Amino acid sequence: MNTIKTIIVDDESLARDLVRNFLSDDSDIEIIGEYSDGFQALKAINSLNPDLVFLDVQMPKLTGFEMLELLDEACNIVFTTAYNEYAIKAFEHNAIDYLLKPFSKERFKDAMLRAKERIVNVSRNREAIEKLKKHNDSSTELLSRIVVKSRNKIDVIAVSKIRYFEAQDDYVMIYTNDGRHLKQKTMKYFESHLDENEFCRIHRSYLVRIDQIAQLQPYEKDQWIVILKTGESLKVSRNGFKLLKYQLEI
Amino acid sequence: MKHPILSFRYGIPIYLASWVFFAASLFIIGWYFDGRPAFNALVNATSFALPLLVLGACIWFVVVYTSLENSGVAGFLLHHLTAGIIIVGLWVSLSYQIRITFFDIYPQEGLNWIIPIHWQIFLALFTYDYIVMVYYLIIYYQNFKDKLTHESELKNLVKEAELNALKSQINPHFLFNSLNSVSSLTLSDPENSRDMVVKLSTFLRYSLDQDLKELNSLKNELDNIRLYLQIEKVRFGNRLQLDYNLSGACGNLKIPNLILQPLFENAIKYGVHESLEPVTIRTKCWEEVSRLKISITNNYDSDSVPSKGKGIGLSNIQERLRLIYGRADLMKIVKGNDYFTVHLEFPQSL
């Protein structure tokens, strides 16, 4: 067996020390990098393609889960965190294990056994990719921010800064005050993962932030458009009109 | 308050049964003990009892709007005397009218027929008093029950508040992450890990011992905060910078127990946690016209997109200040582009 290329991601250096120390007497393991935030880790994982990643959840800028969403390819993850509330989400991401800080060496070895088993069994990897891609559509947690990757940078967009979403084939264009961002997701995904009191699906192609709406105008017979505070106008479908009327209580 | 005849489950049947009992007693007294013809006794009993059927229910409204607490002893007695005279007058004259109108009986004794008029008045007054007492009894019983439920609700609220306070005193993630650091230090730097365990224990003991309603000296509180920040500094290293600026003798001034703790936790959570660059927490304390002023400032990464906080920490502090000092203007929050400051004022003469 080749060595297992391993990356450790944690914003606290002592926490990284501990994982490194626990790994040190395992000759199969080769640590190829340690990173203290999601951005660096993301870059490293995409370029180094490690076999195993120890990942903290709460980190500056980009949380562990947000980082996973941006990975080109799924990889084998062992979560290490003090928060027990992410366990379900982690296993939905097909995590190998979920280590609650502080953890014992026995527990850690247990996780390593599982990791090796998983790494040997490559077919599971494919399953992991599938699950990773599907995951976010199945969870029901509301979004408070969205991460978008473009060619040379990653943007973290606060949901509160979004004006509206526009469907563009397999992508969704997100319009914010700072510009627009393209994200590979469905309109349905955003519709179901945003607060329905804040956003309204006014048209098959538009999901609009309700407090951005300045006016609702008749357009043609039985046709309506909304005018946003920024002056943009968007078409409203018949269903969308009903939904909007319900939301605005008119 | 709703009329007890309507609000109680068997109110109407009980009321009617009492009335029947009253009428039957009158009949038995007239017929059996007084030796009158049965019909005469029945007429007398019915005509005398009929007004009570309505008046008895009406007396409730005299009772419910007159209480000893609101009108004083004299007012209370006067009120009931007036109401009693009116009701008794109504009652006696009504029963006389019923007798001559419906039963067509004009005996020589006139008003004094079967029961002499002064006994009628006495009986009516006595009955009135009795009903009034029953109604007051009902009211006091009802109030007592309300008070009991209210008290248990209050107790629950207090418990909940205490529990929340306890939870906020010890942030579990702080605890677990610190323990993880200790775990790591035992391997790399055992000396330091022992130190950290002692610090953590001292901090926890202090936090658990304090009663949130009490005041403590600024010195004790700041010592504890320093301990907390030292522990965090072990975790975050250079990412956390500390700066204290204490003027003169503020150490002996008083502040509520643990009131600063959540502010430093916030500075860590929104400042240090979200930033890659070092974050400095500046604490400044000074005295100004018998007031202790404290300001806590931390810089934060203006690019970071905060995961939404619930604002419970700050509103809790606001609420505690309001409860202790009776003022809502003691905390001010200034949010700049890359810094966050909380200004606090603690009046020293309570």
Image (tube, grey):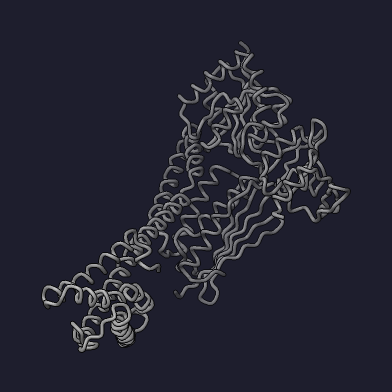
Q: Residue furthest right?
A: A220
In the figure, is residue B264 to the left or right of A220? left
Task: Please report the residue visible at 54 percent of the width from the left and 23 percent of the height from the top.
Answer: A24
Q: In the image, residue A89 lies at what x, y percent?
A: 58, 32
Q: In the image, residue B160 lies at what x, y percent?
A: 42, 54
Between B244 and B180, the residue placed more toward the observer is B180
**Residue A77 against residue B94 in the figure, above or below:** above
Between B138 and B326, the residue placed more toward the observer is B138
Q: How many marks?
A: 0
Task: Name the quadrant containing residue B191.
Answer: top left
Quarter of the image where the N terminus of chain B is located: bottom left
In the figure, is residue B304 to the left or right of B317? right
Task: Name the quadrant containing residue A30.
Answer: top right
Between A125 and B82, the residue placed more toward the observer is B82
Task: Name the quadrant containing residue B198.
Answer: top left
In the figure, is residue B345 to the left or right of B190? right
Quarter of the image where the C terminus of chain B is located: bottom left
Between B181 and B275, the residue placed more toward the observer is B275
**Residue A38 against residue B350 in the figure, above or below:** above
Q: In the image, residue A7 lies at what x, y percent?
A: 63, 26
Residue B38 showing in the rendered view? yes
Q: In the image, residue B110 lies at what x, y percent?
A: 23, 88
**Residue A28 against residue A167 in the figure, above or below:** above
Task: Please report the residue visible at 64 percent of the width from the left and 24 percent of the height from the top.
Answer: A131
**Residue B282 against residue A35 in the figure, above or below:** below
Residue B293 showing in the rendered view? no
